[in-house]
Amino acid sequence: IILICILLISIVLGIFYTFVIKKTKYEITAQILIDKADASIENFVASKDLLNGKSINTSFIKTSKIINISTISNKENLEQSYNNLNSYIQDLQLKLQEIYEISEFNIIERPQIPDKPYNVNNVKDIGICVLAGIIVYGVYIIIMISMRGPTNSIEIENTTKLNVLGSVILENKKDKKQNILYNVKMKKNIEEIKRIEANIEFNKDNRKPKTILLTGTDNKVGTTYITNNLANQYSKLYNRVLLIDTDIKEKTLTNFYNKAIENGITNALELKELEQIEKFIQKTENENIFILPVGNSLIEEEIFLQENVKDILEELKKNYDIILIDSHSINNHVIPIHLTTISDATAMVIESGKTKYEQIQKAKSTIEKVGGKITGIVMNKMM
């Protein structure tokens, strides 16, 4: 689409240039054959005295004794230029006969007023603009490739030394967003969600984690989409799957389950009712999935840095088979930094082709510094 747009713009610019901007020029030419040839004649035919201010170009070919004469003019001055050229030829003939005793002065090509400008070639001009457009597109591609994030799982694993748990294809290509309002529909993505679940469950360094944090390397990489669909997959394996929404700004997961007005984890933290955390948990349409919403208490992120968050998770582990925590980007917020230290496993969600290696390394470094356990990377929005 970008290439087509650039080519169309190039064609329009080419047409505009050749028909509107470009000044048409007309060339009037003549050739004269004389019977003498020397350096003085060559200098004479182009002398200022003979030209007398006229815009005329001359050249003398001594071997063939031919004088080439030409003048360039616009359409408005075409007749005047024609007259000037004829006047020059007459003066040249008189002077050559008088000074150099030229006996033979044959006009082998007489001046004529041209019908068409010599500098207009519509196809050539438009072609040059199209070629320039292709070059611009090539430069654009090079820039985009240099700015583009990783899209190859093997390359990511070799560069970051982290396992790629799965690669989820962008389903809603029209909006270019992974829409949480539906679960995965593509067969490929269903298999990838299963793959992610299996890779988390049977990670050789951290088998069967009970609390799993999902955090992005940047905002809007689709962390909630992965969390929600992973919960649906876990609900086929376990009877009690708990979703915890800690995204206190967007509340995407909470809003999806229509629990925005309900009390949640922020209320529990503010009221310090940790022993009664169960009363804030809500049922969902899936009988095996439960959700602890964000809540309606306006609190700062720093409250999640308290040790009682760990106490909440320990209390919830007693009643649920698996706990999935949906959180902000770890590179942009402090909440997931603490959550990764108290979770059994952390899955890092990136957006294919957009997330840069620097963002992945920054998130990895943050998790490792605080002692979190990185299970691997989920590549989301693959094209």
Image: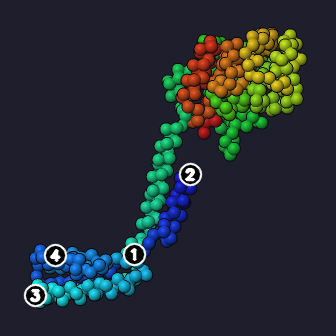
Q: Which residue is mark 1?
A: 25
Q: Nearer the viewer, mark 1 or mark 3?
A: 3
CA distance separating discs 2 and 1: 36 Å
Q: Quadrant of the C terminus?
A: top right
Picture disc at residue 42: 4
The residue sitting at 47% across, 54% down in the picture is: 134
Q: Nearer the viewer, mark 2 or mark 1?
A: 1
In-image side of 46 versus 120 (left or right): left
Q: Quadrant of residue 81?
A: bottom left
CA distance separating discs 2 and 3: 69 Å
CA distance separating discs 3 and 4: 15 Å
Q: Which residue is mark 3?
A: 101
Front residue of 321/12: it is: 12
Front residue of 6/179: it is: 6
CA distance separating discs 1 and 4: 27 Å
Q: Secondary structure at mark 2?
A: helix
In-image side of 288 versus 154 (left or right): right
Mark 1 Cα-neighbour bin, 10 Å: few <14, some 14–19, many ≥20: some
Indicate which disc, 2 or 1, sits on the residue closer to the N terminus: 2
Q: Residue 80: x percent and y percent? A: 37, 85
Amino acid, disc 1: Lys
